Amino acid sequence: MNLPRTRWRLPIASTFAPIGCAPQPAHPPPALNAPFPWPIGAAEGSGNAPDEHRWRALQDPAVDALVDAALAGSPALAQALARVDETQAGLSRRTP
């Protein structure tokens, strides 16, 4: 029996499709064993902020050079906002 391809695909797909949607039993959540308790006040400015130059701990001159180059070419937030304001002011002058 030589059926066209489209005629036999639908019955086979409809046979196997419900298998992937079968309900699964509830699994209990895994136990999380942390090596130490997380300090509660760490996110609230308790002085546990990371070091500003934390990549220096890697002691890799290549990483130091890359980060220094990236920081040199990256404007501070105030500079970026000033550029946005300047651009918006220029655009508002050009529009009638």
Image (cartoon, rainbow, N blue to C red):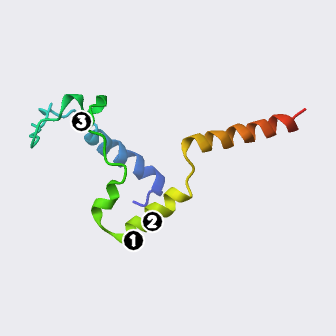
Tell me how far mark 2 sits from mark 3, CA to CA.
Answer: 51 Å
Q: Looking at numbered disc 2 in the image, what kind of residue is underneath it?
A: Leu
x 11%, y 38%: residue:
32
Q: Is residue 92 left or right of residue 3?
A: right
Residue 62 badge: 1
x 45%, y 50%: residue:
7
2 and 3 marks in contact (CB < 8 Å): no
x 61%, y 44%: residue:
79
Given this view, does label 3 or label 1 mark the residue nearer the observer? 1
x 38%, y 66%: residue:
63
Of 25 and 33, nearer the camera is 33
Q: Is residue 15 above or below residue 65?
A: above
What residue would you read off at disc 2?
66
Q: Quadrant of residue 25?
A: top left
Give the image location of residue 10, x and y in percent.
41, 46
Tell me how far mark 2 sits from mark 1, CA to CA.
Answer: 6 Å
Which quadrant of the figure contains the C terminus? top right
Q: Secondary structure at mark 3?
A: loop
What residue would you read off at disc 3?
22
Given this view, does label 2 or label 3 mark the residue nearer the observer? 2
Q: Looking at numbered disc 1 in the image, what kind of residue is underneath it?
A: Ala
